[in-house]
Image (cartoon, helix red, strand yellow):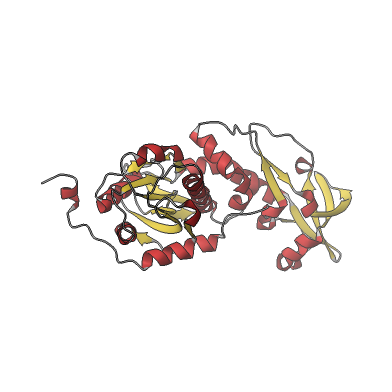
């Protein structure tokens, strides 16, 4: 891959309680002189995100404008209507995942007591690719023959196949094998192991013996790619999500936490779509704009925490001077602020006396 999303460890920042996060964001905007501030949000339409949206509006004393679609897919064109409803903009967004993880998948308990994957929409994009990767990582085998390591590749991964409407996994064979096949096996061919691959995984290779062993997690993102015939101009949310993260899927499926990794990659991808739109397309005039993007952890359908991962700050519409914040920087900025606390109760904000 020519480039990859930020490392998992970098994105795994400390989580914040929502009122702390929103209070610190309010302090940033107040100290910067924001006025007529409209809070806006892009997130999945899951019911677990509703209380977060309500509290965000409560802290900024204004109902929240919606910039998102299912799966936390951003619709940047909604910024135009949003700009007519307020002056300065404070925007929050990103993917969400159930905080209870099993085998790399996040789960949450729904109102009827059923435990289900969350975000289910992202998982529905991911599942086909994870299954292809797990099958390949179990069918390719490594073993030792004399003093040298060997790899056996089934024929199904050796034949060239065109893209179809279903996903396919293709090996980057030149990164796995060294030279021509040594011989045929019962269902494939046996090759010398590519030297650079052997060096990259030398500790695992050193433990090989004559008994074939599944390649497993050694089948890393450099050694395969996916193909699928995708409609890149589709307006179907599921297809749009798949198109936006497709080139990063080898990185995602090889993660020990693929659901979490997909959620983070989707947030990263949508954040930079928004930042590019704000600097290159959106007619912001002299508006101030502050964006925080990150991952929402659903502890239940009623309680969330948030991991800030990216930030963007543009003062008075000056795109060339816009500031970008990576995971450590956006957390440092927020933690320097004293958390604002609304002077009215939530019921008073809602108009209940």
Front residue of 60/309: it is: 60
Front residue of 113/29: it is: 29
Front residue of 59/137: it is: 59
Residue 202, position in %: x, y? 74, 67
Q: Residue at x 69, y 34 (%)?
A: 163
Report whether residue 12 is seen.
Answer: no
Q: Residue at x 32, y 53 (%)?
A: 303
Please give the count of numbered marks on the rendered protein.
Answer: 0
Q: Determine which quarter of the picture holds residue 157.
A: top right
Q: Residue at x 28, y 47 (%)?
A: 54
Residue 87, position in %: x, y? 32, 46
Q: Residue at x 13, y 45 (%)?
A: 352
Q: Determine which quarter of the picture holds residue 15.
A: bottom left
Residue 109, position in %: x, y? 36, 47
Q: Determine which quarter of the picture holds residue 8.
A: bottom right
Locate residue 97 relative to residue 303 in the image: left or right.
right
Residue 125, position in %: x, y? 54, 40
Locate residue 128 relative to residue 311 in the image: left or right.
right
Q: Residue furthest left?
A: 353
Q: Is residue 164 above or below residue 40?
A: above
Locate residue 126 relative to residue 111 in the image: left or right.
right
Report whether residue 331 is seen.
Answer: yes
């Amino acid at each position: 891959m020519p480039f990859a999303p930020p490392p998992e460890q970098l994105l795994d920042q400390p989580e914040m309680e929502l009122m702390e996060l929103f209070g610190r964001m309010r302090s940033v905007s107040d100290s910067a002189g924001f006025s007529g501030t409209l809070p806006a949000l892009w997130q999945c339409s899951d019911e677990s995100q509703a209380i977060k949206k309500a509290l965000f509006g409560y802290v900024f004393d204004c109902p929240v404008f919606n910039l998102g679609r299912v799966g936390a897919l951003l619709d940047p064109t909604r910024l135009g209507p949003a700009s007519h409803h307020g002056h300065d903009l404070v925007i929050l967004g990103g993917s969400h995942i159930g905080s209870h993880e099993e085998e790399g998948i996040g789960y949450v308990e729904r109102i009827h007591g059923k435990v289900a994957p969350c975000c289910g929409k992202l998982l529905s994009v991911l599942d086909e690719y994870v299954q292809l990767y797990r099958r390949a990582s179990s069918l390719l085998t490594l073993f030792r023959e004399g003093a040298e390591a060997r790899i056996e590749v089934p024929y199904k991964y050796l034949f060239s196949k065109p893209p179809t409407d279903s996903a396919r996994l293709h090996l980057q064979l030149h990164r796995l094998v060294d030279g021509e096949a040594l011989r045929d096996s019962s269902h494939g061919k046996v090759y010398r192991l590519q030297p650079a691959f052997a060096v990259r995984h030398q500790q695992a290779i050193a433990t090989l013996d004559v008994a074939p062993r599944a390649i497993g997690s050694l089948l890393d993102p450099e050694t395969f790619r996916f193909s699928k015939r995708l409609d890149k101009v589709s307006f179907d949310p599921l297809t749009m999500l798949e198109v936006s993260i497709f080139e990063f899927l080898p990185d995602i499926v090889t993660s020990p936490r693929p659901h979490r990794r997909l959620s983070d990659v989707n947030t990263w991808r949508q954040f930079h779509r928004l930042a590019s739109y704000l600097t290159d397309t959106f007619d912001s005039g002299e508006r101030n704009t502050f964006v925080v993007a990150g991952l929402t952890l659903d502890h239940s359908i009623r309680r969330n925490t948030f991991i800030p991962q990216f930030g963007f700050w543009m003062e008075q519409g000056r795109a060339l001077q816009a500031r970008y914040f990576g995971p450590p920087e956006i957390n440092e900025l927020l933690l320097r602020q004293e958390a604002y606390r609304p002077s009215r109760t939530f019921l008073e904000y809602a108009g209940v006396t």
